[in-house]
Structures are given as C-alpha cells and as structure tokens.
Amino acid sequence: MSLPADVHERTGGQLVQRIIYSQEDIATRVAEMGREITDYYPKGEDLLVLGLLKGSFIFLADLAREIARPIHVDFLVASSYGSGTVSTGQVNLVYDPEASLTDRHVLLVEDIIDSGNTINRLVPMLEERGPKSLELCTLLHKRIAPPLAREARWVGFDAPPAFLIGYGLDHSENYRNLPFIASL
Ligand code: PRP
C-alpha cells in the first residue's frame, strides 16, 4: 500500500517501510468487531470493557463507540517492553482498574498479542477477581505465541512478524498517533 503524502510530517521524517493496515482497513474491521461484541453479550447484563494501556487507547476509543449496548470502561497499565523492540518477558502492573471485576462480564482489550507474555501474566490475575466471564479482544495477533492462558475471542487482524507502529503502537513512545499501522 502506498504511503500517505503526509507520512514524513507525521513521523518526523522517520523511514516507515510500508502501510500494513490503512485507516480505512482499521475502521471497517473495528466496526465489525463492535457489532460482534454487541451481539455476543446477553442484554441487561453488566459489561466492563477493560483497556490495557497504553497501546490500546486508540483502538479502545474507536471500538467502544462501535459497541451498541451499555458498557462501563476502565483501564489497566502493564508495561513489558523497555525502549527496545524485543519483549523483555517481564510484565509490571503499573495501574490497577478501580472498577470491581467480580460477577461482571469483563472484556480485556489489547492492541497486539506478540510473545503472549502480557496476556499470560494478566489473565490469571484478573481471573482471581471472580469475573462472570473474561474474554479477550485484540486488534492484532502475531500468532507466534505458544498456547495462551486465554485465546482471544475477537482478533482484528493476524499481523505479520514485523515491528509495527501506529494506531496506539509505539517505538520508544513515538508514532502512537499515526492513524494507520505501518512497519518500521
Ligand atoms: C505492548 C502491547 C501489548 C504487549 C504485547 O505493550 O501494547 O500490551 O506489548 O506483547 P507481548 O504479547 O509480547 O506481551 P507495552 O508493554 O509495550 O506497553 P504499551 O502498551 O504502553 O506500549
């Protein structure tokens, strides 16, 4: 896919290899996921949408508006990558959601599943809090992780094994605000 005309302005002149998912690709897929999530949960039951920061902030903002039923939104922050491009394998919980998970449907929203470390560390911690159900929705899944503690029920795209930036994904905190997803 060709690069948008303003890509150099947006990235500060950094070389972006190619667009993997355009703004339009993402919007179409997010709308589909929103409809599927809307249909999946029983009417009248509480649904807590839990965004894993920081990477999911744009995906969650768009997805939440495509879910046509009442939801509550909260966040948790877990950080595993330092400033490099390879997972360190350690997951630190930096912010714990204020909302109670007990007896509620909980939908954990991720931007990407890469090594699976983050999910494998978080899912048991969240399950201990007694949610009525715990499902996982990720925009991107690299499909390179060994079997996960919980497989994602909703996956936006099976992602290529490249280092991806944009739409919430960063490299050393840069590029999260790109409206598309590109390889660096
Ligand atoms: C990234 C991404 C996922 C996780 C996926 O988060 O947002 O949460 O890594 O990688 P894994 O499957 O190998 O664990 P990161 O820790 O970089 O923090 P961020 O969301 O603040 O960018």
Image: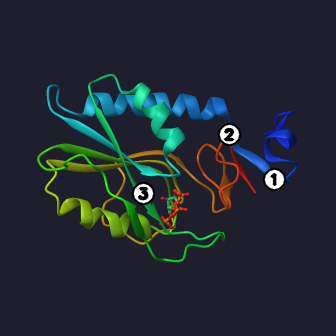
Query: Where does label 1 land, which residue?
Result: 17
Q: Residue at x 84, y 47 (%)?
A: 12
Inspect this view and state whether residue 148 appears. no
Q: Nearer the viewer, residue 1 or 139?
A: 139
Secondary structure under the numbered disc 2 in the rendered image: loop
Q: Residue at x 68, y 59 (%)?
A: 171
Secondary structure under the numbered disc 3 in the rendered image: strand
Residue at the farthest top position: 68
- Is the CB of mark 2 within 8 Å of ligand 1? no
Query: Where does label 3 land, which residue?
Result: 77
Q: Residue at x 17, y 63 (%)?
A: 128
User: Would you say the residues marked 1 and 2 are in contact, meaning their CB atoms lie under 8 Å apart?
Assistant: no
- Is the CB of mark 3 within 8 Å of ligand 1? yes
Q: Amino acid at mark 3?
A: Val
Q: Nearer the viewer, mark 1 or mark 3?
A: 3
Q: CA distance from mark 1 to mark 2?
A: 13 Å
Q: Quadrant of residue 184?
A: bottom right
**Disc nearer the start of the sequence (3/2):** 3
Instruction: Determine whether, in the image, residue 1 is placed left or right of residue 29.
Output: right
Instruction: Determine whether, in the image, residue 71 is placed left or right of residue 1.
Output: left
Q: Quadrant of residue 48?
A: top left
Query: Where does label 2 land, which residue?
Result: 180
Give the crowd class for mark 2: few <14, some 14-19, many >=20 residues within 10 Å.
many
Q: CA distance from mark 1 to mark 3?
A: 29 Å
* Above or below, 49 relative to 130: above
**Residue 56 x, y percent position in the rendering:** 49, 47
